[in-house]
Image: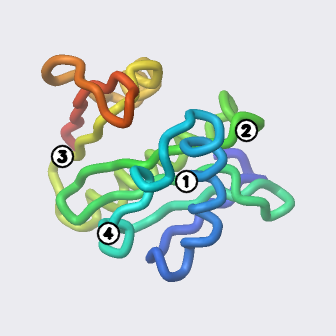
Amino acid sequence: MNPELQIKLGEWSELQADAQAVRTAVFVDEQKIPAELEWDVMDAQCLHAVAYDAQGKPIGTGRILPDGHIGRMAVLSSARNCGVGAEILRQLMAQAKLRGMFAVQLNAQISAEPFYQREGFNREGDLFMEAGIQHVHMNKTL
């Protein structure tokens, strides 16, 4: 892991402001997903991860639901292709394993499928549309 990258794990009540800032920039502003589709009641039930750069600025986020579903993975465009997303994903998978889970799953935007494949995820099923973007279901045994 990049020594200047810090990942914080916590509840929504603790990390909401930073996670929201990243998700708004990536999903709402960049990808034009309607804000009402981005926010859901599951946030309060998830374990969240937020990545911070050397200056303490939030640059990435993700969450894991109690059932092992990873989601809302987002990295600011200025911080992509530097290992931020991979480190967030690895931290969430480690937490799943600590919690006794044997597998994790996610719905990947089709453009992110190669990223998840590099992290050991396998495609399952057909493409489907979510928020106007093609997705594929993927899973990984821990």
In the displayed structure image, the side of residue 18 where residue 64 appears, left or right: left
Q: Which residue is mark 4?
A: 41
Label 3, label 4: how far apart the Cα atoms are = 23 Å
Judge whether 54 appears above or below 1 on screen: below
Instruction: Say which residue label 1 marks.
Output: 61
Residue depth check, mark 4 versus mark 2: number of the one nearer the observer: 4
- Identify the secondary structure beneath mark 4: helix
Circle 2: element type: helix
Residue contact at pointers 3 and 1, CB within 8 angstroms: no
Q: Does residue 95 appear to the left or right of 125 in the view shown?
A: right
Tell me the quarter of the picture where residue 75 sits: top right
Q: Residue at label 2?
A: 79
Determine whether 121 is above or below 34 in the image: above
Asked whether the beta carbons under mark 4 and mark 2 sit within 8 Å of each other, the answer is no
- The numbered dot on residue 103 is 3
Task: Work out whether mark 4 precedes mark 2 in sequence or the reverse, and give the earlier one.
Answer: 4
